[in-house]
Image (cartoon, rainbow, N blue to C red):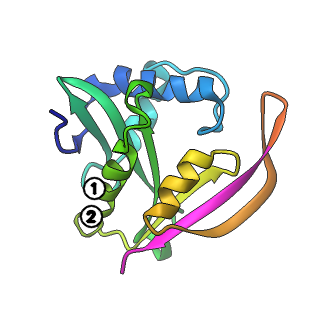
Amino acid sequence: MIKAFRNATIEDLPQIVNIYNKAIEDGISTADSVKVTADEKIDWFIAHDKEKRPILVKEYHGKVIAWVSLQPFYPHLAYEKSARINIYIDSNFRGKKLGQMFLREVLEMADEYNIENFLALIFADNITSLKLFKKLGFKEWGHFPNVAKIKETRKDLLVLGLSVR
């Protein structure tokens, strides 16, 4: 049975990194192009505020199968009710409509984390993620052409947003 989201613990970090490293291999859902280690991600993990902008995990039979990070969109008080959202799903669980279920679940937590706006930064060639976010009401709020270069390929970055209030 897939459990509800819970706050990630430091013990989850190796599994979070494994899922992330698979996304790095795929080359369409993250700007990182070199695999990372759990040790390299400790500062990132600690920087998340469990009360306001946590890392959340989903488990299936005791194994992390998906994680979501909520991060401040921009470090100024004027943006405190806006959060950047990242969602990563274990490759063995992709294509089963879980992304839609998981993303919807996080969006329903907006009040709990005092979020009025969600922003997602997605490469224009990541059709799967674009479809997922747009299906749940996200709209294109920005387009940055050729802003990234991953493995010699230039990529456009789209900023998708959703106001929940």
Amino acid found under the numbered disc labelled 2: Glu
Instruction: Report the front residue among 75 and 150.
Output: 150
Nearer to the camera, 95 or 9: 95
Q: Give the range drawn in magenta.
A: 155-165
Element type at mark 1: helix
Q: What element carries label 2?
A: loop
User: Circle 1 is placed at which residue position?
Assistant: 105
Residue 108 disc label: 2
Residue 159: where, in percent of width, then height? 62, 61
As drawn, the label of residue 145 is: none
Q: Residues within 10 Å of mark 1 (few under 14, many from 20)?
A: few
* Mark 1 and mark 2 residues within 8 Å of each other at the beta carbon: yes
Q: Does residue 52 appear in this view?
A: no
Q: Does the magenta stretch include residue 19?
A: no
Q: In this view, does 19 lie to the left or right of 5?
A: right
Q: Position of residue 141 (x, y in %)?
A: 63, 71
Question: Rounded to the nearest whole Å, what is the CA distance between mark 1 and mark 2?
Answer: 5 Å
* Residue 23 falls in image quadrant: top right
Amino acid, disc 1:
Glu
Above-or-below relation of 161 to 64: below
Whole-percent x, y for residue 102 in the image: 32, 48
On screen, residue 91 above or below 139: above
Looking at the image, which residue is at 57% across and 54% down? 130
